[in-house]
Amino acid sequence: MKLRRRAEFTRVYDHGTRYRGRLMTCFALPNEVGAPRLGIAASQKIGNAVVRNRAKRLVRELFRGRKPVAGIDLVVIPRREMMDASWRNIEAEYCAALQRFAKIL
């Protein structure tokens, strides 16, 4: 499932827990749906449309491969450094964020 509406994103930003890494910033908040939902906020700061779409594809693949605990809204903001990083480093940082959220939430 996806986060689609602006109100859903702002609720996660305002009330969620933040993890700031070198390659991405992640926000997490428990939801009432009972299933994990993903939102991606790739701004123009990281590059043109091709770069933004690649970043979103990378994040979706991370989410697909390593689903977080049930009932969590996750918003990922990729950074420009993500585009030059190896898949292993990107995956390690994403897993670190999920572990931190599992402890807090």
Image: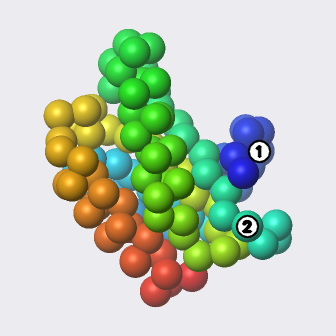
- Find disc 1 in the rendering and name its residue: 7
Find numbered disc 1 in the image and state the secondary structure of the residue it sits on: helix
Q: Given the image, on which type of amino acid does mark 1 rest?
A: Ala
Q: Is residue 55 visible?
A: yes
Q: Is residue 14 visible from the viewing direction of this image?
A: no
> Mark 1, residues whose alpha carbon is within 10 Å: few (<14), some, or many (≥20)?
few
Which residue is located at x 76 percent, y 44 percent? 7
| Residue 45 figure quarter | top left
In this orientation, which residue lies closer to the viewer: 85 or 73? 85
Q: Position of residue 33 (x, y in %)?
A: 82, 67
The coloring applied to the image is rainbow
Going by the numbered disc 2, the residue's amino acid type is Ala
Task: Say few, some or many: other residues with alpha carbon within 10 Å of mark 2 (under 14 / 14 to 19 / 20 or more).
Answer: some
Query: Which residue bears the numbered disc 2?
Result: 35
* Residue 13, position as x, y percentages in the image: 59, 54
> Looking at the image, is 93 positioned above or below residue 60?
below
Measured from the top left, where is residue 50 in percent x and y?
Answer: 40, 15
Residue 24 vs 82, above or below: the answer is: below
Which residue, as the protein is rendered here, is positioned at the far bottom?
A: 103
In-front residue for pair 21/34:
34
Which label number is shown at residue 65? Answer: none
20 on left or right of 49:
left
